[in-house]
Image (tube, rainbow, N blue to C red):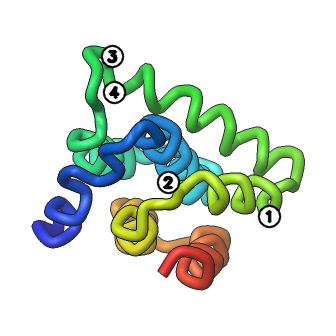
Amino acid sequence: MNRRLDELYRGVAVHATAGSEHRAALELLSLVMLADDRIDDAEVEVMREIAAEWRDDDRAFEEHLRPAIAAARTALQDDTIDAFLDGIDASINSRVLRSALFSAARDIAGADDDVSPAEGSILAEVAVRFD
């Protein structure tokens, strides 16, 4: 895990919107993870590491991840990725979190040592919207 990325996430979005921002970030990262039509254990482990600093409750990581994956899967199946990204974009106001999203998305896409064209396309969109 990139130490700089870990430091960026520490204490991000500590206001009332933190939960919704973190949920939106997990949805974005889930979209990247699902883009190649498979969920790799290495990708899930990177997600777990990234999200470790966000959780402020006792719920298991999987309880946070499942709804994010479901939302991303729906966007992919319904071909509503742009609208999905619009919603995420509107939900994340923290400049620190926004600037860290591309790096996190790149870490997810590269976790399985293979960035697919679909993942690359989403990464390009994330770079434009959030960097």
* Disc ID at residue 61: 4
How far is mark 4 from mark 3, CA to CA?
Answer: 6 Å
- Disc 3 marks which amino acid? Arg
Question: How many residues crowd mark 3 within 10 Å: few (<14), some (14–19), many (20+)?
Answer: few
- Disc 2 marks which amino acid? Leu
Q: Earlier in the sequence, mark 2 or mark 1?
A: 2
Quadrant into which the N terminus falls: bottom left
Residue 110 visible? The answer is no
How far is mark 3 from mark 2, CA to CA?
Answer: 19 Å
Q: Are marks 3 and 1 in contact (CB under 8 Å)?
A: no
| Image x and y of residue 67, in percent | 58, 28
Q: Are marks 2 and 1 in contact (CB under 8 Å)?
A: no
Residue 119 visible? The answer is yes
Q: Secondary structure at mark 1?
A: helix
Please tell me which residue is depicted at 29% across the width and 32% down the height of the picture.
55
Q: Residue furthest left?
A: 3
Please tell me which residue is depicted at 28% across the width and 50% down the height of the picture.
50
Instruction: Please name which of the two marks, 4 or 3, marks the residue nearer to the observer.
Output: 3
List the residue tagged with mark 1: 82
Q: Earlier in the sequence, mark 3 or mark 1?
A: 3
| Image x and y of residue 101, in percent | 43, 66
* Disc ID at residue 29: 2
Please state if 2 lies on the left or on the right of 17 as rendered.
Answer: left
Q: Are marks 4 and 1 in contact (CB under 8 Å)?
A: no
Viewer-nearest residue: 15 or 47: 15
- Disc 4 marks which amino acid? Phe
